[in-house]
Amino acid sequence: MRRSVLRFGLSLSLLLGSGAFAADPAPCPCGKGKPAACEAGCVCEGTTCPAHAGHGMRAGMPMGAQKHVMPVFDPSTVTTIKGRITEIVRVEHGRNFTGVHLKVKAGDETLVVHAGPSFFIDPKMTFAVNDELEATGSRIKLDEVPTLLATQLTKGGKTVQIRTPDGKPLFKHGPPQM
């Protein structure tokens, strides 16, 4: 009993000390105070933290309490883009799940291509900045950022199918268990 109380007290003090239950929102990334206090025209103006734009994160929450917004595949918006990879971002989606997001410059526009989970993508295809990429998928906006939920990627003559044409993932949620 004494050990349980000690563990509970330690856990509670760590949580309270971490700021996870802070009443005030996190400072605005623009450096002008709280997100609600941002002036009109500020890149942070209200809801989207530009440090996580395109990754479904919300401003005003401590980093440990950030909620990820899962994108919804829309079959009516399926399109194909061709462009050059400008950045490769790995986004933690929870325990044992890291998403591979590719920023792709296609014409005058940059889109974030959600390629899929690293455990599924990495063994099939590798990426480097400046690689030419063709991506097919559902074109949506995620936190006002043009995003493509990929169904298929083609690079250097090699094609990887990630989802069915109607958006059902060909991967299971989590790496294979050993």
Image (cartoon, grey):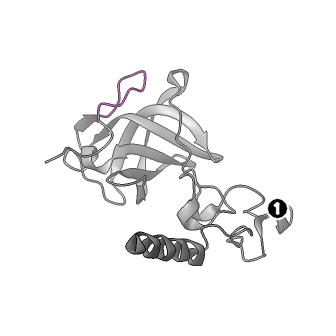
Q: Is residue 170 above or below residue 96?
A: above
Q: Residue at x 52, y 46 (%)?
A: 107
Q: Is residue 79 above or below residue 60?
A: above
- Quadrant where the N terminus sits is bottom left
Q: Residue at x 25, y 52 (%)?
A: 126
Q: Residue at x 82, y 61 (%)?
A: 41
Q: Quadrant of residue 36?
A: bottom right
Report helix, strand or loop for mark 1.
Answer: loop
Residue 169 painted magenta: yes
Question: What amino acid does circle 1 point to?
Answer: Gly
Which residue range is magenta in the image?
161-170
> Toward the viewer: 63 or 108?
63
Residue 44 located left or right of residue 69? right
Give percent across and percent down for residue 92: 41, 57
Residue 12 painted magenta: no
- Residue named by callout 1: 41
Q: Residue at x 43, y 44 (%)?
A: 114
> Toward the viewer: 16 or 136?
16
Q: Is residue 108 above or below residue 130?
A: above
Q: Is residue 10 above or below residue 138?
A: below
| Label 1 neighbour load within 10 Å: few <14, some 14-19, many 20+ | few
